[in-house]
Each structure stands twice: as C-alpha cells, then as structure tokens.
C-alpha cells in the first residue's frame, strides 16, 4: 500500500470530501493561499476556489461563530484554529452555541461542524503554542473530541467527522504531521467512539493518546525483550470514549497505565482511571498509574521542554511499577 504523511492523509480526506459534497467549505487563518501552517490545506484553494476555501482574519471567535451559523443554515464547515492555545477567545461560540443547539432546539438543529486544531509540544514553540488541552473539550456534552495518532486513522476519522451531523473537535498533534504510514487511496471511514488496539499483550494495558501512542509502542518493544507483554490501546476518540475496549483490556491484563501529554492534573487520564476504577476495580491487581506532563506551562528551553514531555523511559518505569518489578 502507498504511504502518506499524517498531513497528506488529512489533506486527501478534505479534498475527497469536498469533491463529494459541495456544501463542505474550509475556513481559517492561512488555510488558502498559504495552504495551512502545516500544509494540511495545501492546494485546496486552487481546486475549489475562494468560495469554498476562505482565508480569515486572526479572529477565532468569528471563525467558529460563522461556522455555527453556516452549519445551522445547511452547510458543512471545516474550520481551523491554528493552535489550540487560542481557542479560549472562541469558547462561547463552541461551548454555549455549537455544542448545545441540538439539545436546546429539541433535536431539530443539525450542527455538522468540524473544528480542526493542533496541540502538543516538541517544537520549542513555548507556553502559548504547545499545550495539550483535550481534557477541556471532553468535559462538554454535545461535543465530540477526536484525537488520531496515525495517518490511516487521521484520514478515516476526519472523513467520519465531516459526515457527522454534530460538532466535532478534531485535534492533531503537530509532531505527527511528518509521520508516514499506509493510507488507502479510496475514501473510507473509521467510526467515532471506537478505540484501536495498536499492540496485543497480556501483562499490562497502556492506554495512550496521539503522539504518546508511538512512545508507548517503543516502550512495549523494549519491555518485550524482558518478556513483558504490553497491550497498547489507542482511544482515537476521547468523547465518546470507548469504555468497552479499555475495560475488556484491563480485564485481560489486570493492570493499567494511562499516558498522555496533557498535564496530569484533571487530564484525560483522570477520567480514564476513574472509569476503570468504577467499572473494573475487582479486576485490578495493582494501583492505576498515570504518565503525563507536570503541572506547569510548557517551557521554551529545549532541555526543559524535553524533560516536560513524557518519555519512553517514563512509560517503562510506570509499567515496571504496576508489575512490581
């Protein structure tokens, strides 16, 4: 099968969906002539024109607010917030309008909006361009939260998100854009709310998200040399969360480590750990461990940023701890 980068897979998903459905349009800062700061929307302006690929001013509230109105009127906007760090100025449009309109209108309103954004550290982009804020959005009823880790998942999940009649917050870790992987040329969908077991194992379950999936797999390779079989579960969608796959994995391995790049306090790992403690406590043979970033803004210094991001060695230590080794 041919290989695409994560960014190319997203671009292909957008292009194929825009060819399929003329009600889909793309808008955001630098998505047109520049092709997106990470190249995800490259070439779309040339193929679909300014009516469907719109550069906007630096005004996040207007980007999402206009998408809410357009979606309510029958279009399917895919809008981009360049960095998740700047979503704060548009929260009312997202939390109080997009996420609630279907509920408040008795199910009569459709809000087929996809908000694409980037998260994550690793580029020395400092505290205002490097955060992982996915837990904020998991807390909002009416909002779906998608967080892919591979090019294959990125394409299938984005197509599913565009075809969904509800608002979807689609988070792309910026350090994954150059990652290559097998991607089918034809359009395909991956159901939202369905996790993927990236590696089978019997000794401990590691639930990891986005860039951390790959560090968990590296840790699993290392631990396999010692005879420790790690099962790596990638939720892919954080809301709705695939509880069944996670709990069934814990029932098999009896141990759980949750890994994410967001800060540990009130992060997505807190929700996953609490859910397993509530619904599968009797199957656990050891306390649940969380591997996450410290409770501090992301440092600018490369040395400090490297120490901030959870590492393969952090994951290995956590696995050994739950195994009592």
Image (spheres, rainbow, N blue to C red):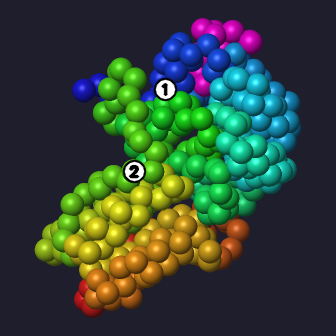
- Mark 1 residue element: helix
Pinpoint residue 309: horizontal percent, then vertical percent. Answer: 53, 66
- Which numbered mark, 1 or 2, is in the foreground of this view? 2
Q: In terms of image quadrants, where is residue 33?
A: top right
Can residue 55 be seen from the camera position used here? yes
Pinpoint residue 13: horizontal percent, then vertical percent. Answer: 49, 26
Q: In terms of image quadrants, where is residue 41?
A: top right
Which quadrant: the C terminus?
A: bottom left
- Magenta-tinted stretch: 41-51
Which quadrant: the N terminus?
A: top left
Q: Is residue 42 magenta?
A: yes
The residue depicted at 41 percent of the width and 42 percent of the height is 191
- Rendered view: 225 above or below 28: below
Q: Which residue is mark 2?
A: 194
Pinpoint residue 311: horizontal percent, then vertical percent. Answer: 44, 68
Disc 1 crowd rating (10 Å Cα; few below 14, some 14-19, many 20+) is many
- Rendered view: 21 above or below 180: above
The residue depicted at 34 percent of the width and 70 percent of the height is 247
Q: Which residue is mark 1?
A: 13
């Amino acid at each position: 099968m041919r290989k695409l980068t994560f960014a190319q897979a997203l671009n292909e998903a957008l292009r194929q969906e825009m060819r399929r459905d003329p009600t889909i349009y793309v808008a955001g800062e630098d998505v047109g002539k520049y092709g997106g700061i990470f190249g995800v929307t490259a070439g779309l302006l040339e193929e679909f024109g300014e009516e469907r690929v719109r550069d906007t001013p630096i005004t996040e509230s207007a980007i999402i607010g206009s998408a809410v109105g357009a979606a309510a009127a029958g279009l399917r906007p895919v809008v981009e917030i360049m960095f998740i760090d700047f979503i704060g100025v548009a929260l009312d449009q997202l939390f109080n309008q997009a996420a609630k309109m279907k509920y408040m209108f008795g199910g009569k309103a459709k809000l087929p909006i996809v908000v694409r954004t980037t998260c994550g550290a690793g580029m020395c982009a400092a505290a205002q361009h490097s955060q992982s804020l996915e837990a904020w959005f998991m807390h909002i009823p009416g909002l779906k939260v998608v967080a892919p880790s591979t090019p294959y998942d990125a394409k299938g999940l984005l197509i599913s998100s565009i075809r969904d009649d509800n608002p979807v917050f689609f988070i792309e870790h910026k350090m994954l854009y150059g990652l290559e992987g097998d991607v089918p040329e034809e359009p395909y969908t991956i159901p939202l709310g369905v996790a993927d077991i990236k590696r089978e194992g019997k000794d401990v379950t590691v639930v990891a998200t986005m860039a951390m999936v790959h560090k968990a797999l590296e840790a699993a390779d290392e631990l396999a040399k010692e005879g420790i079989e790690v099962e790596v579960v990638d939720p892919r969608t954080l809301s709705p969360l695939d509880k069944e796959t996670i709990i069934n994995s814990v029932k098999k391995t009896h141990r759980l480590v949750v890994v994410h790049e967001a800060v540990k306090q009130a992060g997505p790992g807190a929700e996953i750990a609490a859910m397993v403690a509530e619904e599968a406590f009797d199957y656990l043979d050891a306390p649940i461990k969380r591997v996450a970033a410290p409770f501090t803004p992301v440092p600018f210094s490369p040395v400090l940023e490297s120490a901030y991001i959870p590492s393969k060695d952090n994951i290995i230590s956590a696995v050994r701890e739950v195994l009592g080794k």
